[in-house]
């Protein structure tokens, strides 16, 4: 159980740190703002996505929230990572720009898997 808990928090924290960094850059970095235009997105989408990432990170990191909220956050981040991969591939960006969302999707998937294992263990002990 302890190993699963450590794995859960390690994967969740790594993913959330990436999301906090990217959301912050959406608001602070002019180059990132330009990237949204390059990908064909309107500027308001950058703001919406940044806010959604902050909210999603909060949901993943706050213990004790209903599981359904966490599942919504995982789902939203999954859609975001897949969409980022497709968007970068569609405009012909360098492969490292396309691979990063896939790497983060794997980390997110591991976090989700460990969350489910923790929930199964806690339900079995109740």
Image (cartoon, rainbow, N blue to C red):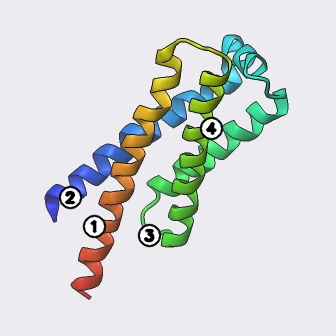
Dot 4 falls on a residue whose secondary structure is helix
Q: Earlier in the sequence, mark 2 or mark 3?
A: 2
| Image spot of residue 75 (x, y percent) | 56, 56
Question: Residue at position x 78%, y 35% from top?
Answer: 45
The one of 97 and 89 positioned closer to us in this rendering: 89
* Residue wearing tag 2: 4
| Image spot of residue 97 (x, y percent) | 52, 19
Residue 3, placed above or below residue 57: below
Q: Earlier in the sequence, mark 4 or mark 3?
A: 3
For the residues carrying marks 1 and 4, which lies nearer the camera in this image?
Answer: 4
Q: Residue furthest bottom?
A: 126
For the residues carrying marks 4 and 3, which lies nearer the camera in this image?
Answer: 4
Cα separation, mark 4 vs mark 3, equals: 29 Å
**Image quadrant of residue 32?**
top right
* Residue wearing tag 1: 117
Q: Earlier in the sequence, mark 1 or mark 4?
A: 4
**Image quadrant of residue 84?**
top right
The one of 31 and 41 positioned closer to us in this rendering: 41
Which disc number belongs to residue 64? 3
Dot 3 falls on a residue whose secondary structure is loop
Q: Earlier in the sequence, mark 1 or mark 3?
A: 3
Cα separation, mark 2 vs mark 4, equals: 29 Å
* Residue wearing tag 4: 83
């Amino acid at each position: 159980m302890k190993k699963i808990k450590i794995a859960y928090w390690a994967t969740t924290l790594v993913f959330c740190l990436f999301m906090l960094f990217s959301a912050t850059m959406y608001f602070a970095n002019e180059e990132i703002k330009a990237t949204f235009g390059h990908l064909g997105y309107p500027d308001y989408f950058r703001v919406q996505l940044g806010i959604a990432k902050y909210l999603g990170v909060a949901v993943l990191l706050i213990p004790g929230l209903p599981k359904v909220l966490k599942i919504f956050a995982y789902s939203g981040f999954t859609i975001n990572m897949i969409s980022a991969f497709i968007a970068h591939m569609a405009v012909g960006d360098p492969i490292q720009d396309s691979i990063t969302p896939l790497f983060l999707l794997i980390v997110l998937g591991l976090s989700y898997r460990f969350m489910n294992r923790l929930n199964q263990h806690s339900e079995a002990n109740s």
